[in-house]
Amino acid sequence: MITALDHIAIAVPDLEKAIKRFMEDFGLPFEGTEDVVAAKTSTAFFPLPPTNIELVHPLDGEGPIAGYLEKRGGGLHHLCFRSDNIEDDVARLKAKGYQFLADAPSPGAHGSRVIFIHPRSCDGVLIEINQPGEEH
């Protein structure tokens, strides 16, 4: 079952500059960064309980975020819903006709498992479903 809005992800062309902006200009607490090799992204986290702001940047200049930035520049990338059972949620949504960008969840930040719903299934909005790992 979907249990919360886990995070709002913002694609950024300059990760260090964006981190500085959120820390210094907005005064948000900075939790750190993590490279998510499977998604080819470098991420930075700003917890704002009960949700988070996540900055995403291409890891080594590659991957889907690189393509997004080339086409659109920085901006809102996706909404992420937290799940307590990602397999059940994926099965339920597939049965309702939702299209996913992958066949199964993949590794995400903080040891989580993630999967994305194709934007055409959600009025043009990219939706991620995230089941937190043990360390979250």
Image (tube, helix red, strand yellow):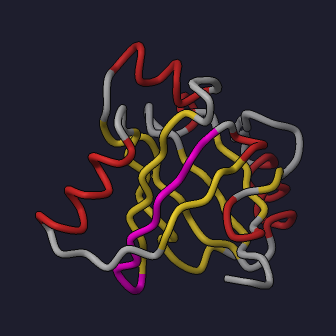
Residue at x 48% of width, y 39% of height: 57
Does residue 53 appear to the left or right of 134 in the view shown?
A: left
Judged from this view, the residue extending furthest toward the top is 71
Q: Quadrant of residue 39?
A: top right
Looking at the picture, how far across and down is residue 48, in whole percent? 34, 80
Looking at the picture, how far across and down is residue 99, in whole percent? 72, 35
Instruction: Using the image as rendered, state which of residue 22 and residue 128 is in the foreground.
Output: 22
Instruction: Using the image as rendered, state which of residue 18 and residue 117 is in the foreground.
Output: 18
Does residue 29 appear to the left or right of 119 in the view shown?
A: left
Q: Quadrant of the N terminus?
A: bottom right
Residue at x 32% of width, y 23% of height: 73
Instruction: Using the image as rendered, state which of residue 77 and residue 123 is in the foreground.
Output: 77
Q: Quadrant of residue 130?
A: bottom right
Does residue 129 appear to the left or right of 79 in the view shown?
A: right
- The total of numbered circles placed on residues is 0
Q: Quadrant of residue 131?
A: bottom right
- Asked if the magenta segment contains residue 45, the reply would be yes
Looking at the picture, how far across and down is residue 30, in whole percent? 37, 74
User: In this picture, is 136 found above or below 54?
Assistant: below
- The kind of secondary structure the magenta stretch mainly shows is strand
Does residue 22 appear to the left or right of 68 in the view shown?
A: left
Region rendered in magenta? 41-50
User: In this picture, is 30 found above or below 135?
Assistant: above
Instruction: Using the image as rendered, state which of residue 68 and residue 18 is in the foreground.
Output: 18
Judged from this view, the residue extending furthest toward the left is 25
Q: Quadrant of the C terminus?
A: bottom right
Residue at x 38% of width, y 64% of height: 53
Residue at x 35% of width, y 48% of height: 16
- Asked if the magenta segment contains residue 96, the reply would be no
